[in-house]
Image: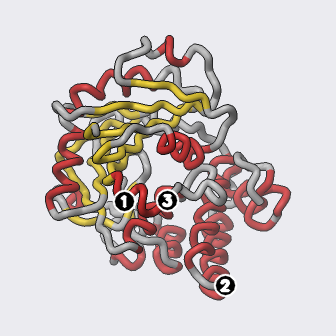
Amino acid sequence: MIDLAIIVVAYQSAADLPKLLATLPAAAGGLTWQAIVVDNSSDPGLAAACGSPDNVCFVDAGSNLGYSGGLNVGVRNAPDSHFTVFLNPDLSLGANALLRLVEGCSKRGAAASVPLVLDDSGKPQPSLRREPTTLRSLGEALFGDHWPTRPPWLAEMVRLPADYASARPVEWATGAALLVRTSVVEAIGPWDSERFFLYSEETDYARRIRARGYTIEFAPTAIVHHRGAGSGSGPALDALLAVNKVRYFQKWHGQPSSLLFFGVAVIHNALRLRRPESRATLRALFSAPARAALPGGIV
């Protein structure tokens, strides 16, 4: 049994993936590992573009299964391991980053750990999150980044630099990088690809981890660099992000609460109606055909 099974879902990632794979040996810090790259774009030249590195196997997904669907393919093709690592292709990992995630996971007996995420300029990204609630969603809609010191019950995003300075349990984090004990991966089952083609799958996965009584640890000494926008950008993806937040809330809450959360999503985008992504989001929130036209085609 190896230490790490590393799963990467690629979609038109030939420009990014070689950089990530080149950082894996140093990031592992002596741990044994195998990487499984699931190619959602069925690019026959992807392995060659990466130089066909050792310890890396490429799996053709056959079609674009979305991020969560690709991760499930990766899990099914992974070798036996103590830990499973889920990575975006547009990352590069710092030295010993994976080793530090393992140490963070082991420190307090956590089931999973997440790293400190830096942008291209080396500035920390606000990657940590609190569980979505209607009030937190309303706070994000009304204030965004304009009141970073507001109470936690009014903010889903964790913005204060002090919260990124030391290790601590967190509710969830953006899905760029996540290490989970493989025994926990097996216990909680597949990522929810039926609801979440892209976006909110990490929120759901973290909640399922916590629902079993496990904790997720933030490990600030594990450093990764994230270019971002590796999945693309545009009004359709922004609309999918908002729609999947509503889908997530509906999965875990009753109808009255979900209707309030839906209303806040409408308010959020109505306040930003000049933006094409907000107009696309409002269409998708109210129209089943518009939702079906979003990536993944889920109504």
**Cα distance in 3D space between marks 2 and 1:** 30 Å
Instruction: Point out the tag, 3 or 1, that comes first from the N-terminus.
Output: 1
Instruction: Point out the tag, 2 or 1, that comes first from the N-terminus.
Output: 1
Q: For residue 11, what is the image quadrant?
A: top right
Tell me if mark 3 has few (under 14), some (14-19) or many (20+) residues whose alpha carbon lies within 10 angstroms of its own: few
The picture places residue 181, in percent across and down from the top left corner, at 31, 54
Q: Say which residue label 1 marks.
A: 184
Q: Residue furthest bottom?
A: 256
Eye-nearest disc, 2 or 3: 3
User: Which disc number belongs to residue 189?
Assistant: 3
**Cα distance in 3D space between marks 2 and 3:** 26 Å
**Cα distance in 3D space between marks 3 and 1:** 8 Å
Colour style of the rendered protein structure = secondary structure
Quarter placement of the N terminus = top left
- Going by the numbered disc 2, the residue's amino acid type is Gln
In contact (CB < 8 Å): disc 2 and disc 3? no
Q: For residue 25, what is the image quadrant?
A: top left
Residue 237 can be seen, yes or no: yes
Q: Say which residue label 2 marks.
A: 255
Residue under the image location 70 percent in, 50 percent down: 276
Quarter placement of the C terminus = bottom right
Residue under the image location 64 percent in, 29 percent down: 41
